[in-house]
Amino acid sequence: MTPEAALEALRAAAVSGKADEMRAYHKLDRPYLGVANPDIDLMAREWRQSLPLDARLSLAAGLWGTNIHEARIAAAKLLTQARIRPDDEPAWQLIQGWVPDFDAWAIADHACIAAQKRLAADPARLDQVEGWTQSPLMWARRAALVATLHLTRLTHPKPDEIAARERVLAWAERYLGDPDWFIQKAVGWWLRDLSKHDPDRTRAFLAAHGDRMKPFARREAARHLA
C-alpha cells in the first residue's frame, strides 16, 4: 500500500458535493476529498491491521505530507492503537514531527488521539509534551492538553498518574492568561473530562482559579458538577 494507492481508495469513497461542505465547515484552505470520517476509519483500520510497522509508518508519513484533509486524518488513525510492537518510538517521533503542522482542530485532535496512546505507553514522554506548552504556535500549546486527556479518564489512578495529572493542571493554570479561544476551550474540556472521574479535584481547581477563567470555559469545566 503506497500513499498514492491509499489516496485513490480515499477518492473512491468521496461523496459528491461533500468536499465543498467540508471546506466551508473547517474554514481552512486545503484540499478536501469529501470522504466521511467512518469511511476513513474503516480504511485506516484495514491498513493498520494488514501492514507491517515500517510500511505503516511510511504510509502515515506519506499521507500526512499530502496536506489533504482526509489523508492527514487517515495518517493519524494509522498510529492510533494501544500497543505498537516491537518499538513504538518511531511512531512517537512521527507524531511529534506533525505538531508544528497543526493548523486546525479536526486534524490536530485526531493526531492527539494517537499521541495519547503513545503517552500512555511511555509516560516519560510527558517531558517532551511540556515543551509544546512553550511553543509560539497556538495549536501546539493546545495539543499539550488534548494529547493528555487520557489522564482525566483514569478511575483509580496510581500515584505517578496523579502526579502527571497535577503536572498538566499546572499547565492549564499557566494557560489562563492566554487570550486564544481555542486554548481556553481546551482548558475547559480538560477540566470537564476530569470532573467525571475526580469531581473534587475539578472543584478545587475552579475554586482556586475560576475567577481567572473565561466564563464559557468555566461553564464547560463545571458542566457535569452538581
Image: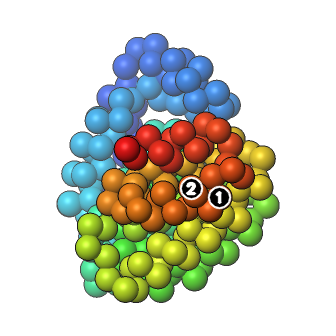
Q: Amino acid at mark 1?
A: His
Q: Which residue: 36% across, 29% down?
A: 36
| Residue 99 visible in image | no
Quadrant (top left, top right, bottom left, bottom right) of the N terminus:
bottom left
Quadrant of the rendered image containing residue 29: top right
> Local crowd at mark 1 within 10 Å, few (<14), some, or many (≥20)?
few
Which disc is residue 209 wearing? 1
Left-right relation of 55 to 67: left
225 and 117: which is toward the camera? 225
Left-right relation of 215 to 18: right
Q: Amino acid at mark 2?
A: Leu
Q: Position of residue 168 (x, y in %)?
A: 55, 70
Image colouring: rainbow
Quadrant of the rendered image containing residue 10: top left
| Residue 201 visible in image | yes
- Marks 1 and 2: in contact by CB < 8 Å? yes
> Local crowd at mark 2 within 10 Å, few (<14), some, or many (≥20)?
some
- Local secondary structure at mark 1: helix
Q: Which residue: 78% across, 47% down?
A: 179
Which disc is residue 206 wearing? 2
Q: Position of residue 39 (x, y in %)?
A: 29, 35
149 and 158: which is toward the camera? 158
Q: Which residue: 34% across, 53% down?
A: 196
